[in-house]
Amino acid sequence: MSLSFLATTSPTLTNSSSFDLRPSSSKAQVSIRRQISCTSSKPKDQNENVANDLIDRRNVLIGLGGVCGATATFGNMAVGAPIQPPDLSTCRLANDLQLTNRVDCCPPYGSTPVTITDFKLPDASEPMRIRRSVEALETDPKYLAKFREAITKMRALPADDPWNFMQQAQIHCAYCNDAYSQVGFPAVNLQLHGSWHFGPWHRYYLYFWERILGKLIGDPSFAIPYWNYDQPSGMRFPSIYRDPFSSQNSLFNCNRNPDHMASLMSYRYAFGDPNPLPEEEEAVILANQKQLHDIFAENLFNPENFLGQPLSEGQVRNGPGALENLHAIPHRWASQVYRPYWDMGNFHTAARDPIFYAHHAQIDRLWSLYKDQRGTTTPEFDQPDWLESSYIFYDENRNVVRCKVKDCLSTSALKYTYQTEDRAWLNIRRTYFNKKRAAPRSAAQDEMVAVSEFGTTPRVLDTTIRALVPRPKVSRTKDEKEEESEVIFIDDFTFDSSDTAGFEVYIARPEEGLVSADLGEFAGSFVHIPHSHGQSDQKNILHIGITYLLEDIQAEASEQLVVSLVPRSGVVTIAGISIERVSRQVV
Ligand code: C2O
């Protein structure tokens, strides 16, 4: 089988592989306003509230008066204070512009005054909860039965019980689809994605979900599983969540993409991409692991590029880190392909699929692995605007608690840990390049083309943009690299955040202004899951570390690089591309 290694890992402009890498805007777009396929085989409770929580926009306009108009946002200004938990009494209908509807995601507590206490770490004498992979559960029927029983019990709670499965899912909607304003900033929505809040907020969310499940089955050591898609064997939809044949499987959800239940997930999946062919799978697995490797290696000492950009009170999210961009892929891949991308593909509904929690446990695990790799217990950010920021959750003792970022930075203090798994991908770089060098190149890949600079006029990314970008310094020494990372800045790009959006970034080394038609090496991607606020003028940033990638493509001495942006979904407008040196955080 003559699979071109490059065909899957580095699409060329003249791509003829079976991967369809055209921008999705050029593919047949099917827009279905509302698609609920959960009818016949639907286990009870799962999507019942779907119809109930859709409220016709007209009623809302009548009922809420000015509130709808209050979603305009400020640009990011230096406010300099940690974000505060929401004022629960102000919870309003959330946005889902994919549905052109408003949805009720407000918690059942909160309308009457509630007592909020400060979160306390669990007692040191508590048993350590050991989170294992979804695959480990496959071979532990007793544990699996316990997990399914806990979810069954959670689904069976009264609909307005804050522990109820659907109520738990609504927490995600409320915090992500504009149900709250930031306290003191009525025009700024509270949003937990797209910044350095992504990691800590989801950590707390899972922490309480796990402990509530443990309570429901009376097991204080109960731990949730994680979806181990860093491992080749974990890059498919976990079987324990899949089996639809018995209504006993409380992990089943019918709003998923049926074409992806057995296929291999590519970390570069965009809606509409075909599944990898069997002969392509090896290259896809390797490309996935290399991508994960780079996310760690390039960002180890630039945590804002890994965990997300700073966000203080009064500011609007503008920069997911590499971990969050990667995390958007399983969301997309698990979800239905059509608007509004039920369930995982839309933040309003994502947490209705039990796979959400296994997916996020994996993201949480990758964050703790990042911390291990940094070799320090020092927080990734020392700014009080991060450490002192706080959120509100309903805990396993039925209290409403205020949780600060600084209290969730040690998983062992939170009394849970992840079972160690093979981490060979942390050292995948050599294997990847050996394989790549050995792969035959086509004549088209070697054809040379001219490329010019990006210029100063914003451009819609409707076809691949290739630009010659100057580097600030060439031939950097090892010491210089340890002080400063080299980073591609794609700043101030815009898109409609209520829809899906995304693009990929490749780098190549030019020779006298010419570059091979091959896009070169994958450097990173931006991947957006639709949620709320439809402002298309909100400016976003993507920063991709390339220090070691430059060595890999032997470009350390090049004064310029060719940076290629490949549209993958949605309509994104690019304002500019530059390469900068960024100080590394010394830990
Ligand atoms: Cu809050 Cu994976 O999303």
Image (spheres, rainbow, N blue to C red):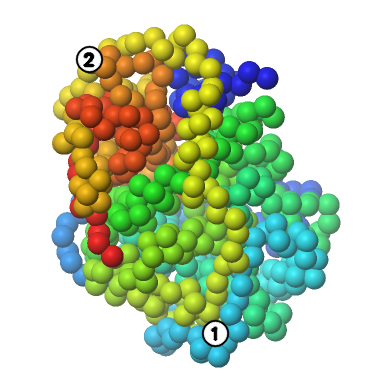
Can the viewer see residue 277 in this picture? yes
Q: Residue 35 appears in which quarter of the rendering?
A: top right
Identity, as a three-letter code, of the amino acid under mark 1: Arg
Q: Quadrant of the C terminus?
A: bottom left
Q: Which residue position is annotated with label 2? A: 512
State the separation of the CA atoms marked 1 and 2: 67 Å
Does residue 163 lie above or below 4 as drawn?
A: below
Q: Earlier in the sequence, mark 1 or mark 2?
A: 1
Is label 1 or label 2 in front? 2
Q: Which mark is residue 398?
A: 1
Disc sitting over residue 182 in the figure: none
Q: Quadrant of the N terminus?
A: top right
Residue 544 lies left or right of residue 139; in this view the side is left
Q: Position of residue 492 (x, y in %)?
A: 24, 40
Q: Residue at x 42, y 83 (%)?
A: 119
Horizontal and vertical percent for residue 438? 53, 24
